[in-house]
Amino acid sequence: MAEVHDKEEPYAKGMDSHKTAVERAREYGIDISLIEEKLKLTPTERLKGLQNWMEFTEELRRARERDLNKNDGT
Amino acid sequence: MTHIEQALRQLVEYDVEFIIVGGVAATYYGSAYITSDLDICYARHETNLKKLVDALRPWHPLLRGVHDPVPFLFDAQTIKAGLNFTFTTDIGDIDILGELTGLGGYDKLFPLSFETNVFNINCRMLNLDTLIEAKRKAGRQKDITVALELEAIKELERKRKR
């Protein structure tokens, strides 16, 4: 099947307009497999995942703060 | 951390006219980019400013990134006098945007958004093409990353539908 090409000029420096959007994203360093996994979820599941991630990073931040208060933080 | 569900529920309960834009909208579409705040574009008419202030006030919004204490009164008049505000609140970081760069405000974005249901809450989401445009126009490194992701998502979904 032929690849779909985005007609718009790429706006990120040095991008090849003849490449597909997926190819451009991959070239830029984006992990397409992560996106493919997200697309298997419903939008609400994606937002719940984001919420869980935020809670997890907050817990990590608190743990780091606790450790810094306990010792020299190294 | 921003409690997205709680924030959205409160805004809807107070009948605030707003559109979800930014990183949360990108997550909605499938972006893997992790955002830490909720960005909304709000309607600028006076009734809505009052509702918005009433909805957010219980969480004690403060200007984010202001290190020296500045006098800031969180009321409809202050919001009317400004446009885009970045707040830190008791439930996390919430940015309220009167306009998106190069795209305009709520009235212009309304027809470019649609009603959706997340967390069992009916709210408005900026459509994918406009979100991509917004990210392109914002032009920061992180915006370009998200724009490229969203374009890839659009392409993957187009292929999937064939």
Image: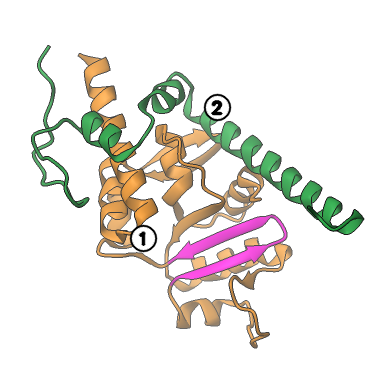
Chain colours: A green, B orange
Q: Tell me the residue that label 1 is attached to.
A: B106
Residue B93 lies within the magenta run = yes
Between marks 1 and 2 in the image, the one whose residue lies nearer the viewer: 2
Locate residue B42, reporting x and y percent.
Answer: 45, 61
Relative height, residue B54 to residue A2 (above, below): below
Query: What residue sits 48% from the left and 29% below the top?
Result: A43
Distance in Å between CA atoms under marks 1 and 2: 27 Å
Q: Tell me the residue that label 2 is attached to.
A: A45
Q: On the image, which quarter does residue B41 sit in? A: bottom left
10 Å neighbourhood of mark 2: few (<14), some, or many (≥20)? Answer: some
Query: What residue sits 8% from the left and 39% below the top?
Result: A7
Relative height, residue A19 to residue B23 (above, below): above
User: Is residue A14 or residue B32 the one in the foreground?
Assistant: A14
How many numbered marks are there? 2
Specify whether B110 is left or right of B74: left
Whether the residues at callouts 1 and 2 have beta carbons within 8 Å, the answer is: no
Q: Is residue B120 visible?
A: no
Locate residue A67, reporting x and y percent.
Answer: 84, 51
Specify whether A47 is left or right of B83: right
